[in-house]
């Protein structure tokens, strides 16, 4: 997206948000802004996945608008926020109430949305393709299933992948190791410690030592 900043620098923009604009950051803010009756908003990635499956199965055909938010609480619960999401959500609600009571007429500029349109061609990404060879791809899928079954299945994200399934795929592709999983690493360290302890008992006596090594 290429923007000519000089065009906007010459305009006097009044940074005034409406009640709808302020509430957009909270879960349900987008639904409220649509003014539709049959809206459903869900926050939390696992909850969103569950509801999307319900929609795919045709169980929620009466919904006019679905708002799915990966972050808990909405944008206020995002990874780059600096405030506690519950505190921020409460502040936004209070600010919405204040703006709702404010009956003063606000002035808004008309924005030419063509200035914000993407003017570059999107390139296709093959990120989901395991391999161009279908037989090799099938073998990789089997390996992913086997590795995934051996992982704890907690989807904690400590390994750097969003979930255990993603980590299994990264391992098969050669981008990660099973010991990136802290639980796998912990178990491996425990086994190594036990082996070292057993070996330490079998260390031969030091040459020239007067100490008698008991069996």
Image: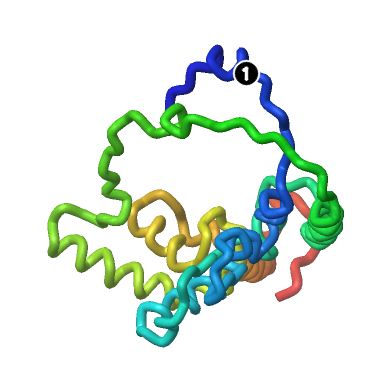
Residue drawn 61% across the image and 68% down it: 43
Left or right side of 77 for 46:
left
Q: Quadrant of residue 192?
A: bottom right
Colour pattern: rainbow
Residue drawn 56% across the image and 74% down it: 37
Q: In which quarter of the image is residue 53?
A: bottom left
The answer to whether 11 is drawn above or below residue 161 in the figure is above
Q: Quadrant of residue 172?
A: bottom left
Q: Where is residue 40 in the image (x, y as percent from the top left)?
A: 55, 74
**Front residue of this view, candidates 58 and 102:** 102
Q: Name the residue under label 1.
A: 11
The answer to whether 126 is drawn above or below residue 193 in the figure is above
Quarter holding the C terminus?
Answer: bottom right
Q: Where is residue 209 in the image (x, y as percent from the top left)?
A: 77, 53
Label 1: how many Cα within 10 Å (few below 14, some 14–19, many 20+): few
Residue drawn 26% across the image and 64% down it: 140
């Amino acid at each position: 997206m290429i923007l000519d900043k000089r065009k906007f620098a010459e305009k006097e923009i009044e940074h005034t948000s409406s009640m709808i604009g302020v509430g957009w950051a909270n879960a349900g803010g987008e639904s409220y802004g649509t003014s539709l009756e049959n809206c459903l908003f869900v926050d939390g990635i696992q909850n969103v996945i569950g509801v999307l499956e319900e929609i795919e199965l045709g169980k929620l055909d009466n919904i006019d608008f679905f708002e799915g938010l990966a972050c808990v609480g909405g944008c206020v619960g995002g990874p780059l926020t600096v405030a506690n999401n519950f505190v921020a959500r409460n502040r936004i609600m209070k600010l919405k109430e204040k703006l709702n009571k404010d009956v003063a007429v606000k002035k808004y500029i008309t924005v030419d949305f063509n200035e914000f349109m993407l003017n570059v061609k999107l390139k296709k990404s093959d990120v989901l393709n395991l391999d161009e060879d279908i037989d090799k791809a099938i073998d990789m899928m089997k390996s992913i299933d086997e590795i995934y079954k051996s992982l704890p299945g907690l989807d904690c994200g400590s390994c750097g992948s969003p979930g255990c399934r993603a980590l299994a795929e990264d391992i098969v592709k050669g981008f990660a190791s099973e010991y990136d999983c802290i639980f796998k690493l912990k178990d491996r360290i425990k086994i190594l410690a036990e082996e070292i302890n057993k070996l330490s008992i079998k260390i031969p006596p030091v040459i020239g030592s007067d100490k008698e090594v008991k069996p």
